[in-house]
Image (tube, grey):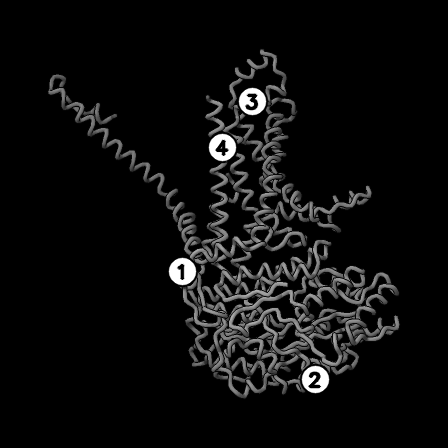
């Protein structure tokens, strides 16, 4: 843009040259923009390649190759292409499938509670029902600042019979409660995750609600909508995009369930060393020293995550399109 | 999204491990193994008690070879992961300590090298054949046994006297006794079934004639739930169901309290546990004696082993002969055993028969009221049933089985189901390793 104005072109000089010069200048400007883009995006791509593409590539490679010895395995080792053998082993391993089942159950409980809970809290704060809004927000958000491992430790303490004040309190009321029993262990883990992340997602929703035009809400009030109806039928559809985003991130995060069960594993027999797919991968690599198996399980988990995220995105965009029609 | 572990970072963490391995391989520590004075330096890793004393004794008496010892955590506490990772990075120690169940796994992974030609005939002749059999596969020896630990019954002689109990000789008598103890004293039990005790259960199954792994057909035949194992599982399940015994983890404060407070009257474990007990509970001096493990059939007595270690020369070792010389001294020289026992924490039963007399003389018998426990160990070691084979991924099999035991202890599933679960959790691993496998499901 600046280049064209600096061109000292006489007003009467051949008019056709001006567009050419302009084109050339635009090309130069585009090249500079591209160069700037390149410089600014290099760190991103460098990181993408080193911490994502190369590791994923390595995992894929590892899942197709193995150090094999024929027969009993005491011969000399050689690296061979084994095709889908590791995948077949993973997918026929009842402990891995059990882990997938556990995570599915976990997602089914966690996802609706998290998204619904965060949304309700955000709507409550936004509606002005809650006094001391800033304090409420801070209080809800604070657990998110606690690192996951510390959170798990705190809850491990609260869940362990004999040392937990909560269990003692229940016991005084003649209620025996086992937070780490067969049916309670998954809800207990859900509880830890909710505690950690509810406030965070609430802030996301709250920020989205702030962007809802006030006129729209005023119009709905004028039309006679009560506060509940305004919240559910006016505000909620307007923050749909945030809801989808939070749902996808929560789903991806939930599929990698690792820290909480890994720690609770110390004190509950109901959590095995292969409780979730991520724990299975860890166990395969570091206890069983079976890198092909760990790599194959990682790739399976990655594919599941991609498929689910894609599915959710497709589903919501189709719903959007239908609504637009 | 601050504070969230993303899918990317998780995958990067899993997949980047081999990369870090490769990086540290470049900075390997295998250069200066021959020191400036012309001495050969051997690095040695062990979690065994008394190893420092043994190494000191070796270094004092040897000029040409010096051993650089490093105490590492026990296998389950990360020692085996440390060894695997070091081997992957190319800087494993010259000599590593491996317990019997893990020998096949480290041999298959190529961490323990084939030392068939390094083991001298004199050493071979000295070792108990059942022990050497556990470290030899397809005619190749992968490690040298240090000790072999027949399972025995440690019992509280004072409490047996107080309640008028007889030491049981058969498992039937043992079950009868368990019932008696519960009836007589409701808060005490005869024994603990350890939910973290795959190795204990294996010893019971071994004694009963089980064959969890069999390599005789040229493939790994896995049958964790064979008839003898099911029999043993049903026996213990019966005791558990009638509340005749405790069932919880043995590596726990709960079990410490049970033993420390005399709530449990017997401990079924390897011979080594006599020394560990002395070390852990000096206050119970004089209260314990040791008896043979109960038998299924007294006419054909048999026992399995519980615990015991071996020494392997690793693939990264630069001086295999020197490493072997150290190993041979450590397992067969009287000074080595004396040094180990001098730590006061060991009652290992040596795999080299000639050392038994040394152990008997060096062991302080006062804790066991003067009982000659080495004589008992010698009788029991002769009953070790030959032909037992550990599997290629015993740490994994152990974890799955113990997870299932723990669930059974919490009222979900049974011991027999735990064995089947362990088998199902083991097979995919072996297949993924490319081993020939057959399965015997029952």
Label 4 SS: helix
| Earlier sequence position, callout 3 versus callout 1 | 1
Q: Position of residue A152 (x, y in %)?
A: 63, 47
Name of the residue lying farthest toward the left: A13
In the rendered image, residue A305, in percent from the top left (x then y), is placed at: 50, 43
Q: Mark 2: which secondary structure?
A: helix
Category of crowding for the residue at label 2, using alpha-carbon neighbours closer than 10 angstroms: few (below 14), some (14–19), many (at least 20)? some
Residue A144 vs residue B111, the one in the foreground:
B111
Q: Secondary structure at mark 1?
A: strand
Q: Determine which of the numbered discs, if any, sits on residue A235 in the image.
A: 3
Q: Are marks 1 and 2 on the same chain?
A: no
Circles 4 and 1: CB distance less than 8 Å? Answer: no
- A33 vs B213, left or right, is left
Give the residue pinned by disc 2: B360
Check disc 4: other Cα within 10 Å, few if <14, some if 14-19, many if 20+.
few
Q: Please determine whether, in this image, residue B108 is positioned above or below residue A3.
A: below
Label 1 resides on the chain identified as A
Of badges 3 and 1, nearer the viewer stands 1
* Same chain check for tags 3 and 1: yes
Task: Tell me whether the residue at label 2 lies in contact with that at label 4, contact meaning CB atoms closer than 8 angstroms.
Answer: no
Does residue B114 appear to the left or right of B193 in the view shown?
left
Residues beneath discs 2 and 3 located on the same chain: no
Indicate the position of residue B287 as horizontal and vertical percent values: 81, 74
Query: Of the residues tagged 2 and 4, which is closer to the observer?
Result: 4
How far apart are the alpha carbons under marks 3 and 1?
56 Å
3 or 4: mark nearer the eye: 4
Mark carried by residue A315 = 4
Q: Decide: marks 2, 3 in contact (CB < 8 A)?
A: no
């Amino acid at each position: 843009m600046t280049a064209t104005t600096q061109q000292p072109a006489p007003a009467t000089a051949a008019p056709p040259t001006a567009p050419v010069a302009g084109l050339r200048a635009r090309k130069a400007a585009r090249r500079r923009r591209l160069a700037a883009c390149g410089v600014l995006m290099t760190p991103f791509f460098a990181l993408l390649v080193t911490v994502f593409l190369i590791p994923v590539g390595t995992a894929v490679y590892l899942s197709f190759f193995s150090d094999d010895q024929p027969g009993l395995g005491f011969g000399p080792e050689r690296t061979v292409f084994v095709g889908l053998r590791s995948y077949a082993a993973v997918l026929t391993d009842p402990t891995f499938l059990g882990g997938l089942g556990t995570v599915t159950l976990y997602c089914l409980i966690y996802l609706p509670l998290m998204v619904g809970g965060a949304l309700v809290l955000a709507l409550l704060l936004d509606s002005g029902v809650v006094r001391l809004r800033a304090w409420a927000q801070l209080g809800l958000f604070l657990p998110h600042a606690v690192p996951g491992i510390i959170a798990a430790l705190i809850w491990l303490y609260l869940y362990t019979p004999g040392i937990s004040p909560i269990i003692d309190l229940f016991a005084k009321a003649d209620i025996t409660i086992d937070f780490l029993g067969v049916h309670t262990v998954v809800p207990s883990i859900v509880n830890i995750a909710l505690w950690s992340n509810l406030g965070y997602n609430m802030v996301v929703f709250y920020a989205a609600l702030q962007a809802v035009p006030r006129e729209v809400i005023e119009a709905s009030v004028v039309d006679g909508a009560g506060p509940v109806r305004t919240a559910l039928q006016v505000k909620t559809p307007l923050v749909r995009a945030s809801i989808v985003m939070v749902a996808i991130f929560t789903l991806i995060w939930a599929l990698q369930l690792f820290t909480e069960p890994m720690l609770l594993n110390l004190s509950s027999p109901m959590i095995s060393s292969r409780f979730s797919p991520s724990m299975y991968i860890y166990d395969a690599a570091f206890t069983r020293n079976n890198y092909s198996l760990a790599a194959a399980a990682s790739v399976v988990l990655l594919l599941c995550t991609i498929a689910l995220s894609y599915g959710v995105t497709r589903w919501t965009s189709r719903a959007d399109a239908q609504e637009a029609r | 999204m601050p504070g969230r572990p993303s899918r990317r970072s998780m995958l990067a963490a899993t997949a980047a491990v081999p990369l870090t391995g490769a990086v540290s391989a470049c900075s390997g520590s295998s250069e200066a193994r021959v020191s400036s004075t012309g001495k050969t330096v051997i690095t040695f890793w062990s979690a065994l008690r008394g190893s420092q004393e043994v190494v000191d004794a070796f270094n004092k008496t040897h000029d040409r070879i010096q051993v650089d010892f490093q105490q590492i955590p026990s296998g389950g506490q990360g020692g085996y992961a440390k060894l695997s990772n070091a081997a992957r990075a190319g800087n494993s120690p010259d000599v590593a300590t491996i317990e019997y169940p893990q020998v096949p796994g480290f041999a298959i992974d190529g961490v323990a090298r084939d030392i068939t030609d390094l083991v001298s005939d004199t050493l071979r002749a000295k070792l108990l054949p059942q022990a050497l059999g556990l470290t030899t596969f397809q005619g190749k020896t992968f490690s040298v046994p240090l000790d072999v630990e027949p399972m025995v019954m440690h019992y509280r002689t004072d409490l047996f006297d107080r309640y008028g109990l007889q030491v049981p000789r058969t498992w039937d008598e043992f079950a009868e006794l368990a019932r008696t103890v519960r009836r007589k004293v409701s808060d005490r039990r005869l024994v603990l079934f350890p939910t973290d005790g795959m190795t204990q259960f294996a010893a019971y199954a071994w004694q009963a004639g089980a064959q969890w792994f069999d390599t005789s057909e040229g493939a790994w035949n896995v049958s964790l739930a064979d008839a003898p194992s099911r029999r043993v599982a049903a026996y213990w399940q019966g005791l558990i169901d009638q509340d005749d015994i405790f069932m919880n983890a043995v590596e726990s404060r709960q079990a410490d309290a049970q033993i420390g407070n005399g709530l449990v009257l017997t401990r079924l474990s390897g011979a080594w546990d006599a020394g560990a007990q002395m070390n852990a509970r000096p206050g119970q001096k004089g209260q314990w004696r040791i008896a043979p493990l109960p038998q299924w059939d007294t006419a054909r007595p048999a026992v399995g082993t519980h615990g015991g270690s071996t020494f392997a020369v690793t693939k990264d070792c630069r001086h295999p002969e020197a490493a072997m010389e150290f190993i041979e001294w450590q397992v067969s020289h009287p000074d080595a055993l004396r040094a180990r026992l001098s730590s006061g924490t060991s009652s290992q039963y040596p795999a080299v028969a000639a050392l038994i007399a040394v152990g008997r003389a060096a062991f302080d018998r006062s804790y066991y009221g003067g009982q000659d426990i080495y004589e008992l160990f010698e009788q029991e070691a002769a009953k070790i049933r030959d032909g037992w084979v550990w599997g290629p991924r015993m740490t994994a099999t152990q974890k799955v089985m113990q997870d299932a035991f723990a669930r059974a202890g919490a009222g979900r599933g049974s011991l027999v189901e735990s064995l089947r679960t362990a088998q199902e959790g083991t097979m995919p691993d072996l297949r993924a390793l490319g081993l020939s496998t057959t399965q015997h499901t029952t």
